[in-house]
Image (tube, rainbow, N blue to C red):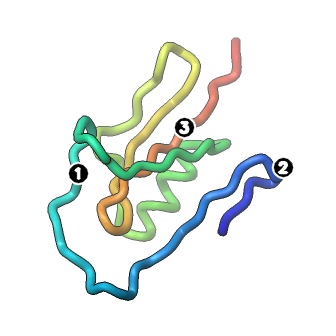
Amino acid sequence: MLQTPDGGGRLELFEYLHPAVIESAPTVPNEIGMHRVAFSVDDIDDALRIVARHGYGPLRGVATYEGVYKLAYVRGPSGIIVMLAQELQPS
């Protein structure tokens, strides 16, 4: 169980041991039932360097959403899509 530093949020990570795993194709972004998790990061470029060391990279690069966030999607373990979001400071 991961908990945010302020105690306001938790994320449970688990793995099925029984019954046996059923292999399937990774979900696509607009498919019902998609498994995705999002993380707020202080520095998206640094976060992407860390995930790259584990063999993962952005699915479609880094985008800026309405000048408020820099976003990147990474397909992680078990095909889970992980969104990384860096809030941009107003200039």
- Mark 2 is on which residue type? Asp
Q: Are marks 3 and 1 in contact (CB under 8 Å)?
A: no
Task: Say which residue appears at 55% left-offset and 52% top-offset.
Answer: 47
Q: Nearer the viewer, residue 47 or 80?
A: 80
Residue highlighted by disc 3: 85
Residue 23 to residue 57: above or below: below
Q: Of label 1 and label 2, which has the lower sequence position?
A: 2
User: Residue at the right extreme?
Assistant: 6
Q: Are marks 3 and 2 in contact (CB under 8 Å)?
A: no
Residue 23's spot in the image, x, y percent? 18, 73
Residue 51's spot in the image, x, y percent? 46, 61
Neighbour class for label 3 at 10 Å: few (<14), some, many (≥20)?
A: many
User: Gap in Å between the C-alphas at discs 3 and 1?
Assistant: 21 Å
- Mark 1 is on which residue type? Thr
Q: Of label 3 and label 1, which has the lower sequence position?
A: 1
Quadrant housing the N terminus: bottom right
Task: Say which residue appears at 52% left-offset and 45% top-offset.
Answer: 38
Q: Circle 2 sits in a helix, a strand or a loop, which is it?
A: loop
Residue highlighted by disc 2: 6
Quadrant housing the C terminus: top right
Residue 33's spot in the image, x, y percent? 31, 47
Q: Nearer the viewer, residue 15 or 69?
A: 15
Residue highlighted by disc 1: 27
Q: Circle 3 sits in a helix, a strand or a loop, which is it?
A: strand
Q: Is residue 33 left or right of residue 14?
A: left
Residue 48 to residue 69: above or below: below
Pair 3/1: label in front: 1
Task: Say which residue appears at 52% left-offset and 61% top-offset.
Answer: 50
Q: Circle 1 sits in a helix, a strand or a loop, which is it?
A: loop
Task: Say which residue appears at 47% left-offset and 34% top-offset.
Answer: 71
Neighbour class for label 1 at 10 Å: few (<14), some, many (≥20)?
A: some
Residue 68's spot in the image, x, y percent? 58, 19
